[in-house]
Image (cartoon, rainbow, N blue to C red):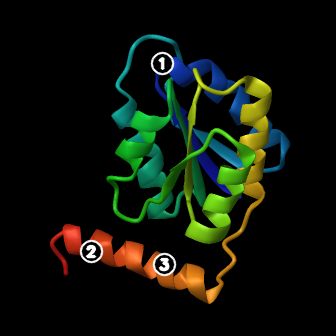
């Protein structure tokens, strides 16, 4: 799987570790920055990963900031992105299986590194079930996205 990953300064160290974890699991990884702990703005990096996902350059994306919340909010502003904020493995895989999440947000100040490894691997190992109830709900989410993008 092709995976794009990025972080702000708060998530820089965890992002570097997760880049190796993802690659070691056999995935192709594109690291979109940041490449130091110098202060940067998380929306820029969340948007870079979101663009990679919606353009097809990556099949999934991972963003890391201090809490994960800001990166998740920013990524979800990009049409076609379904970014789940997860701090446990259940949420990571369930968001893909039921909600067809294509991005994962993590908080570097919330989860430890070993748990972050497990969360990422759970997210990447999951597949959308395609069950009718999940397809129906996903369609409703996409309808909301179109409605509030002025395309209703």
- Above or below, 127 against 133 in this view is above
Instruction: Quickly name the residue at label 3.
Output: 137
Q: Residues within 10 Å of mark 3 (few under 14, many from 20)?
A: few
x and y percent of residue 138 in the render? 48, 76
- Say left or right for 45 vs 119: left
Instruction: Identify the element where label 2 is drawn.
Output: helix
Nearest the viewer among 84 and 75 is 84
Instruction: Quickly name the residue at label 1.
Output: 9
User: Sequence order check: which comes first, mark 1 or mark 2?
Assistant: 1
x and y percent of residue 7 in the render? 51, 30
- Above or below, 131 against 108 in this view is below
Q: Residues within 10 Å of mark 2 (few under 14, many from 20)?
A: some
Name the front one of labels 2 and 3: 3
Spatial CA span between label 2 and label 3: 14 Å
Instruction: Identify the element where label 1 is drawn.
Output: helix
Name which quarter of the figure residue 126 lies in: bottom right
Instruction: Quickly name the residue at label 2.
Output: 146
Q: Residues within 10 Å of mark 1 (few under 14, many from 20)?
A: many
């Amino acid at each position: 799987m092709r995976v794009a990953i990025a972080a702000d300064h708060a998530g820089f160290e965890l992002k570097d570790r997760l880049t190796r974890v993802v690659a070691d699991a056999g995935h192709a990884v594109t690291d979109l920055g940041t490449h130091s702990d110098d202060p940067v703005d998380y929306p820029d990096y969340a948007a870079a990963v979101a663009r990679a996902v919606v353009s097809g350059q990556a099949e999934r994306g991972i963003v890391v900031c201090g809490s994960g919340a800001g990166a998740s909010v920013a990524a979800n502003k990009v049409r076609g992105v379904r970014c789940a904020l997860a701090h446990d493995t259940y949420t990571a895989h369930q968001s893909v299986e039921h909600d067809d999440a294509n991005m994962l947000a993590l908080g570097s100040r919330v989860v430890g590194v070993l748990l972050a490894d497990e969360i990422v691997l759970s997210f990447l190992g999951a597949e959308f079930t395609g069950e009718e109830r999940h397809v129906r709900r996903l369609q409703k989410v996409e309808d909301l996205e179109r409605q509030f993008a002025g395309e209703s």
